[in-house]
Amino acid sequence: MSEVYDLIIIGAGPAGLAAGLYAGRSRLNTLLIEKAADGGQIAITDDIENYPGQKVEGESGPELIERFSQQVDKFGAKRISGNVTKVELTGDIKKVYVGKDQTLYESKAVILATGANPRKLEVPGEAEFTGKGVSYCATCDANFFEDFEVFVIGGGDSAVEEAMYLTNFARKVYLVHRRDELRAAKSIQERAFKNEKLEIIWDTVPERLEGDGLLQRIVLKNRKTGEVTTYEADEDDGLLGCFVFVGNIPNTDLFKDQVKCDERGYVITDEDCRTNIPGVYAAGDMRVKSLRQVVTAAADGAISAMQVEQYIAANE
Ligand code: NAP
């Protein structure tokens, strides 16, 4: 008979890693499954400055997450790399299937920590030019745009922070926001307004992305005046950058037919991260909550792991 773990954690972003740390310290027999690199969205964030206790001077997401991972490993959670393809969460023994060959792993409890993915603009040309001018990760792709012109779409924390980061590479960064006021935190806005390489284009959305093999034209529409403007890549450049940061979509498709979610697909939990299914918890950006940050994801991970410990004790 295969091993039944106390706990399976799906996802190794800040929530899943914090859960792994707490579960390990509680001596729960824990399996942590991640399909890609640790860190989730933090792994593609250049500059983190608001995680309490982190190194204050410019610590990047990958550096912070590396320390999360080392701490998990110290306390003994088992780790595997694989894509979870199916889950059966309703019984006393939870079943988690991994990979094309559907390898089965079983546990008494599950923490869902699958995070969220970047939302797309859904405009013509976006898919065609992804990787050919269109990007969702400044840390990954900024260096391709050294001394080029770059557009950043969005007005939240991510868009404004990543636009500022991109000014270290691009010769000019245009931040295109659909309203006349940014959503980003005031402290972030203040820095952005002072940045001379950053220009904000207000009340505007991209209508189309065009080019010949590479992104060369971006067609913008002012939502108040209806005016349409086409920005063309400089002839010497032959390429424009378009970085999209318009929010996130929760990664809950795998289990939203079993776990109760809201109309946008975020998992509904109580404040102790319990879902509607006994023994199943949700932690991090994919659950309904008011603040999606590393600190709140890590807190969810800790809370849910401690709930698992109590759940297992009560059901033994
Ligand atoms: P967000 O806060 O949801 O902001 C998304 C932005 O994209 C908004 O400005 C929104 O405009 C705009 N938008 C949405 N759909 C659009 C569309 N179809 N076309 C054009 N614009 C569109 O997302 P986020 O900035 O990725 O942040 C996600 C979460 O992570 C937030 O809770 C944020 O605070 C957090 N975060 C924190 C930090 C930090 O503290 N350092 C850094 C990054 C992210 P409207 O404003 O008009 O809705």
Image (tube, rainbow, N blue to C red):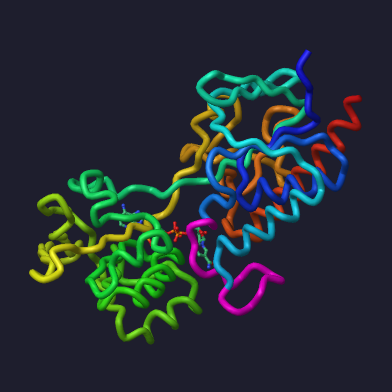
Question: Is residue 139 covered in magenta?
Answer: no
Viewer-proximal residue, 105 or 229? 105
Q: Position of residue 3 (x, y in %)?
A: 78, 21
What are the residue bounds of the magenta stretch?
Answer: 42-58
Mainly helix, strand or loop, the magenta region? loop
Residue 217 against residue 194 in the figure, above or below: above
Above or below for 198 versus 133: below
Tell me residue 164's x, y (percent). 39, 75
Image point 60% across, 29% down: which residue?
259
Toward the viewer: 100 or 6? 100
Q: Give residue 271's position: percent from left, percent from top.
A: 72, 47
Query: Does residue 1 appear in the picture of this structure?
Result: yes
Quadrant observed for ligand 1 in the rendered image: bottom left
- 169 lies left or right of 186: left
Q: Quadrant of the C terminus?
A: top right
Q: Residue at x 30, y 71 (%)?
A: 180
Which image quarter is the N terminus in? top right
| 1 left or right, relative to 155 | right
Q: Residue at x 19, y 65 (%)?
A: 224
- The stretch drawn in magenta includes residue 46: yes
